[in-house]
Amino acid sequence: MSLSRAAVARDLAHKVNPFIGTLADFGQLNPAAVAPYGMVQLGPDTRPANHAGYDFAAGHLIGFSHTRGVGVGCSGAGGDVRVSLGYAGTGPAWAIDKAHETAHAGIYSVRYGGGIAAAMTATRGAGVIRFVMPRAGSVDLLLTFDEGYSRRHAAQWQAEPDGDVRASFSAGTVCDQGRYHLYSATRVTRSGGNVRLVWTGAGGKARSVLQVRKGEVVEIRTGLSSIDPTAAAAVRDYELGTRSFDAIAGATRAEWTRQLARLTIRGSAEQETLFYTSLFRVMQTPVAIADPDGRFRGSDGAIVQLAPGEQHYTSWALWDNYRTQMPLLAFIDPLRAGAIARSLVRLYQTGKQRWATTTEPFLTVRTEHAGIVLLDFRRRGIVDFDAKAALAGMIAESATLARTTPDEQIEAAYDDWAIAELAADLGQAATAEQFRAKALSYRIMWRATFDMLGADADLVHARGLYQGTLAQYRWAPVFDLPWIAATLGARFRPELDRFFADNLYNMTNQPDIHVPYLFAWSGDAQATDRIVERYLRDRVAHRYTNAGIRPQAWTGRSFAPAPQGFAEGMDDDNGTMSAWYIWSCLGLYPLVPGTPGYVATTPHVRAESSQRGSWQTSVP
């Protein structure tokens, strides 16, 4: 179904508030200018900063960088190609004029440093910063390639005769697990004309000095590529061309409205702001990495040439977003989901590791459960990828999975279940039987650990668990829910009730975010409605951090239309939590990724999908 004219006509990009979740540790998000699924996230770096280089409460700015993760935890990753511009003698940090700081989908602007007006926008692989100078004077311009949000490994730059500054650099991916290698090409223009500046500096910093007039416009145009600096220049010139800043920003904004119109809703102003901002976050990853000529580097560092019209995606966080964000992309954008599936198959073929290789083409997080995503896509009708190659990669990966702690056994069992299911779909009965038995062998551990919870049930990291408690991981094997319900028998519903009555649920992390929907799965949708309503709208006492239990619960909304947009310590994790919010508003939930169905509950908005039409009614 094509997008409706009414949906496209609405300025959905304007409903996005990129400042939501940008305060301290309330989402780890940022207001950067970004195109849908773009590798360039061009935005402010502040002092102090949070994991994405920016803190809404910060008073000082140190520059504008071109990459960052989307609420990814640890110290984040990115912060590449930082541009710092200020009047001589005023740096290296400038006061932010918060009254003149704005952001919408695809654009960010701010005044700082005594009135310098900076605005920025982005395409898939390029970005442009426009500075308007409030007075004449000498201006220092600094390009930084050896600083960012993770460990820097190497950086070098070179000034070209045509005025470009071309750079190569590498840095740690999220949590410094692995390393990515990236290239850039930057050009400076003044009032519409190219300038050839004199650049000084060594290693990872390039400096220049400009003499500017009052009201003069200085633009910094940068392209990124995984190939080499020359390719980065080609990306910049192709994607930005000679278009004006306003034309580029307008095109990116229009593309955001087109993409956001894949799900249109009617609700209160607050609901629409939260919904479209959540959808905006969902549509930022994975990242489209291939240059316009179809080239990219795989996770093994080798250059790949795609067929015309194809795209490759990377920047994964699949341990988190296989649960909610990936099924949502399959629901609203099956063509893109097909390209993502083909990218995952290539990932298996080019050095896939559970976190990252040392030759990644872009910042990334984790790739666990890629096989579940592929099974889920296929069973939702996305079949334009090589399922046999996917299965071969999944089988090879199974032998490498950690299986020591209770959560590791559950996680590995889910992957093995996906292998069995995909093998069965492909007619490989012996493989299906082998891996189904391997998957269900976790039940011995589950009976010994989770059937009757002990005194350590509410202890974070008990028995080696990763960021969770036994009470939370008890419900994690969603692929085997009928068996868990049968094993608990008459205790199933009372144990679920107690889980929420004793506030054992953790909305701020992923292992148990599906548990409210177990009531609806077992036949009581109203119980799910009551719990979901609380977490969508009410102030809730949040007890947990990733490391333990708070001495005193943090009480507040889990989702709010403010810089304090998430519960404290709640990472968005590449759209995982934003997608949970969207599903919950729609009254649908993909409880078991890898199966094509949804748990249906009461919707909180009137919604229409460009793929599936209208299916819901409003709820007061």
Image (cartoon, grey):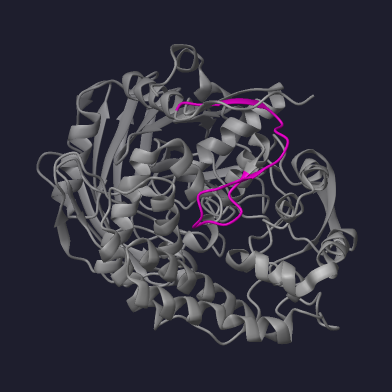
Whether 609 is among the magenta residues is yes
Above or below: residue 377 compared with residue 619? below
Above or below: residue 266 compared with residue 451? above
x 45%, y 22%: residue: 134
Q: Position of residue 596 (x, y in %)?
A: 50, 49
Q: Position of residue 339 (x, y in %)?
A: 30, 47
Q: Position of residue 407 (x, y in %)?
A: 61, 77
Nearest the viewer among 373 and 575 is 373
Nearest the viewer among 11 and 121 is 11
Left or right of 454: which side holds 432? left
Quarter of the picture containing the C terminus is top right
Instruction: Locate residue 269: give its quadrant.
Output: top right
Report the span colored magenta.
589-610
Q: Which residue occupies the extreme left position in the image?
A: 161
x 67%, y 38%: residue: 587
x 31%, y 64%: residue: 390
x 43%, y 28%: residue: 256
Whether 286 is among the magenta residues is no
- Magenta span: predominant SS is loop
Left or right of 213: which side holds 100? right
Above or below: residue 476 compared with residue 330? below
